[in-house]
Image (tube, helix red, strand yellow):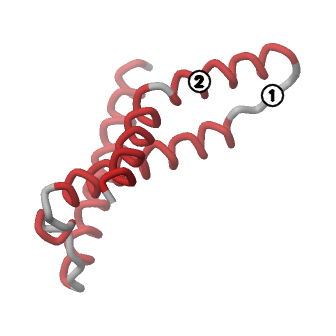
Amino acid sequence: MERRFRTLELALVLRITVLPDIFQSTVEAVKSYKPFQPVAAYLVYGVVRCLSAIALVVYVLARSDRTIRDIGVNFEPRELLRALGIWCTGIATYYVSYYGVTMAVE
């Protein structure tokens, strides 16, 4: 079991430290040889990067005999209303600041 944890540790460290640079170099190499739209590649890269960060948090918690629920991540239906309010506030703030800057520039 300890060997499996060591392998997982190595994979997580390599994923977070080395693979982003390898990915970036590969995209730049492909982009320079032919027409290439890296939007989908960057989308996949972003999702994998976020999932890697979550995996690292879960791993660190597992090594200390804790779970995600121990740090307060759980689901309650009343949280949906709060999340919707935060989301609406963020969208409204974005548009107010965007149009404020746009009108100030003109």
Q: Which mark sits nearer the N-terminus, 1 or 2?
A: 2
The percent coordinates of residue 56 (x first, y second) are: 32, 48
Task: Please tell me whether mark 1 sits on a helix, a strand or a loop.
Answer: loop
Secondary structure of residue under mark 2: helix
Work out whether 55 lies above or below 40.
Answer: below
Q: Is residue 91 above or below residue 98?
A: below
Residue 50 drawn at (x, y percent) = 42, 47
Which residue is at the far top?
A: 32
Q: Is residue 60 left or right of residue 72?
A: right
Please name the residue that numbered disc 1 is placed on.
36
* Residue furthest right in the image: 34
What is the number of the mark on residue 22? 2
Horizontal relation, residue 94 to residue 30: left or right: left
Of 91 and 16, which appears nearest the observer? 16
| Residue 22 drawn at (x, y percent) | 59, 23
- Distance CA(mark 1)–CA(mark 2): 17 Å
Circle 1 or circle 2, nearest the eye: 2
The disc placed on residue 104 is: none
Quarter of the figure that contains the C terminus: top left
Q: Considering depth in this image, is 76 or 82 the residue closer to the camera? A: 76
Q: In the picture provided, is 23 more to the left or to the right than 95?
A: right
For residue 96, which quarter of the picture? top left
Instruction: Say few, some or many: other residues with alpha carbon within 10 Å of mark 2 (under 14 / 14 to 19 / 20 or more).
Output: few
Q: Is residue 61 above or below residue 19?
A: below
Q: Amino acid at mark 1?
A: Phe
The image shows residue 86, relative to residue 20, as above or below, that is below
